[in-house]
Image: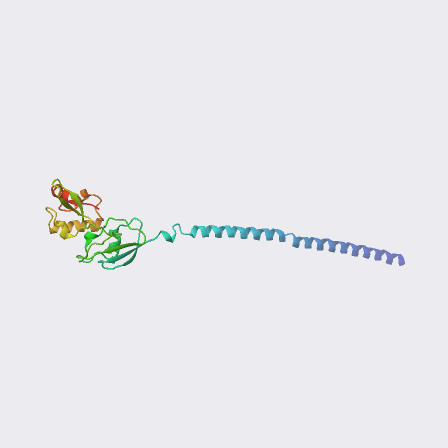
Amino acid sequence: MKELVLKYLWYALAAAGIGIALFLYFSQNKSMAHQQPSAPVENTMIKADASNGAEEGSRQQATQPANPASAEIFVDIKGAVKKPGIYKADAEDRVYDVIQKAGGFLKNANQSQVNLAQKVKDEMVIQVPKQGDPAPAQPVPGTSSDASASAASDSGGQTAEKVNINTADEAALETLPGIGPSKAAAMIEYREKNGPFQKPEDLKNVSGIGDQTYANIESAITVQ
């Protein structure tokens, strides 16, 4: 009987030892399974942060303006225009363009004093005088000190004035040979719609002015 008890006791101890060994084995594997993923997860987060930073930098570069604000042009228009003030202009704008932004000339404006074909630049002041105002002592940007004409010497040594067809008003245009009120008005209407004349020959594009009329006034006109 004693031997049988000892035999079962031995079996019980062996079974307990095997159970303890299995418990320790599975406990160690479970601990290792929890520890191993921590490093790859951290690496993944670092890579994700780096990727997000690169994308953010690309977006910031893409949203930066191509042209700095310093490239903007502002022109101060004063005098005989409908809406004097400071106007934003484009680099290719002429004096004529910004005067149109200011509402155009007043009826008493002396247009012959203004060089409509001149290109504008930043901080430019365009002073439009009234008729009867004295010519400026010094040239002012945007104006022409020689009014609507330039001096030229004819064969007799006398000085003749040429009418600037880009700045002359109706009264000045009607001084040209064969140009009456209707043709003068047509010339002004043409340059208001199409901009300043680039060369004297462009005058033939105006309705009512053909080759013969142009030939009669060619020597008396100029473009500035």
- Residue at point 25%, 58% (across, down): 78
- Residue at point 59%, 51% (across, down): 43
Measured as percent of width and height from the top left, residue 102 is found at: 25, 57
For the residue pair 177 and 24, the one nearer the viewer reads as 177
Measured as percent of width and height from the top left, residue 122 is found at: 32, 52
**Number of dots carrying numbers:** 0
The reply to whether residue 57 is visible in this rendering is: yes
The reply to whether residue 1 is visible in this rendering is: no
- In the picture, measured across the screen, residue 106 lies left or right of residue 56, that is left
- Residue at point 52%, 50% (across, down): 51
Which quarter of the rendered picture does the N terminus lie within?
Answer: bottom right
- Residue at point 16%, 43% (across, down): 152
Measured as percent of width and height from the top left, residue 112 is found at: 19, 52
Measured as percent of width and height from the top left, residue 12 is found at: 81, 57
For the residue pair 44 and 141, the one nearer the viewer reads as 141
Q: How is the image coloured?
A: rainbow
In this view, the residue farthest toward the right is 2
In this view, the residue farthest toward the top is 155
For the residue pair 22 and 137, the one nearer the viewer reads as 137
